Image (cartoon, helix red, strand yellow):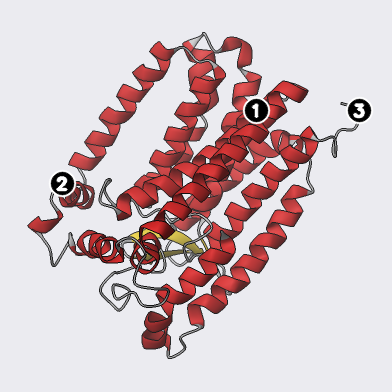
Amino acid sequence: MVLFGLLMVYSASFIFAEERTGDGFAFIRKQFVYALLGFGAFFISSRVPHQKWYEWAPVALFTIIGMLIFVMIPGVGVRVGGAQRWMNLGFVRFQPAELAKLVGVMFVARQLVRHQRELHDFRKGVIGPVALLLPMMGLLLLQPDFGSTALLAGTTFILMFIAGVRPLFLFGGLFAAISAATALIMTSPYRLARVMTFIDPWRDPSGKGFQVIQSMLGLHNGSLFGQGLGNGKEKLFFLPEAHNDFIFAVIGEELGFIGVAGVILAYILFIYRGLKISWLSLHQRNDRFGFYFGCGISLILGLQAFINMAVVMGLLPTKGLTLPFISYGGSALVLNLFSIGILYSISKANQGSFYESD
């Protein structure tokens, strides 16, 4: 999927990079370096026994909260497109929200293990696992990054359901979350504009609805077999963020329904393998942390992929979430591969490569 992503980033970004920087290879060169760093991160995380993350989760959570606070400081945080989500490290810009999703899943997995016997109790079994997660979510909303917040909240909901939290508590919390999200949308002009654009993109075809309309045109033009790799027209300054958030539209236009179906099947296979590794962790080794953490990684990356594809097809309002392993972006690619390294370490533990005494 990463190799396929490199191919599609090259196809989607070459003309744009030529126009913006004078070098058509500017974006693909950076993405190639990010991929190498990502596989280095994969190698490192795959060599760490995953139970270590149980011990490190609280420190990781407070560290990421600190980073999200630093992002809000002028001069440290970088504002792009109205959102202040990046830290300027001098030689590179880093997006803490990508790390926050992994750390959030890690911390919830730890808390569910610690509170496993108390899940019937609302205060200890529901508030306990998520209380310390709320400040991080609040900071994500301030950036603003509603997409990452909703994704982390949705994954947390599923993990708590899997863990056995009472449905009454869960759906009560879901109702409260939906009410809060509705209030955020209604009191935020840009979020309300996104929802209205989702309902009817043609109400402002040259403004707010332009990106979604061009995305759907690209998918329509792809038909069954596509226009051919490199032959897409929407990436020629019609479709904003063609190499990033909306790269799935370029795939649809150039590789058609066949390419789109292949990408969807790849993510389904990824989710299936991740959940199977997690299931074996629980039933072979009674490793609840490995089970929850593996499920969380599989779900948060899989859900992000399907949310991104739904946005591109006009089935959801725009969220600013990339397509994992495929979209352009250094922080996302490196941390996605780092997460897969953790999933691989859980798989190795199932096979006895770690924890020989078990």
Asked if labels 1 and 3 touch by Cβ distance under 8 angstroms, the answer is: no
> Where's the C terminus, which quadrant?
top right
- Which amino acid, by three-letter code, is at mark 1? Trp
Which residue appears farthest toward the right when viewing the image?
Answer: 357
CA gap, disc 2 to disc 3?
A: 57 Å
The residue that mark 2 highlights is 199
The residue that mark 1 highlights is 279
Given this view, does label 2 or label 1 mark the residue nearer the observer? Answer: 1
The residue that mark 3 highlights is 357
Which residue appears farthest toward the top when viewing the image?
Answer: 120
Front one among 19 and 186: 19
For label 1, the crowd category at 10 Å Cα-Cα, with few meaning under 14, some 14 to 19 and many 20 or more, is: many
Who comes first in sequence, dot 3 or dot 1? 1
Q: Quadrant of residue 109?
A: top right
CA gap, disc 3 to disc 1?
A: 20 Å
Please tell me which residue is depicted at 25% across the width and 39% down the height of the picture: 184
Image position, residue 36 (x, y; %): 66, 68
Q: Is residue 40 left or right of residue 212?
A: right
Image position, residue 355 (x, y; %): 86, 33
- Which amino acid, by three-letter code, is at mark 3? Ser
Above or below, 174 against 37 in this view is: above
Image position, residue 124 (x, y; %): 54, 14
For label 3, the crowd category at 10 Å Cα-Cα, with few meaning under 14, some 14 to 19 and many 20 or more, is: few
For label 2, the crowd category at 10 Å Cα-Cα, with few meaning under 14, some 14 to 19 and many 20 or more, is: some
Image position, residue 111 (x, y; %): 60, 25
Q: Is residue 179 left or right of residue 48?
A: left
> Where's the N terminus, which quadrant?
bottom right
Front one among 223 and 125: 223
Q: Secondary structure at mark 2?
A: helix
Q: Secondary structure at mark 1?
A: helix
Given this view, does label 3 or label 1 mark the residue nearer the observer? Answer: 1
Who comes first in sequence, dot 2 or dot 1? 2
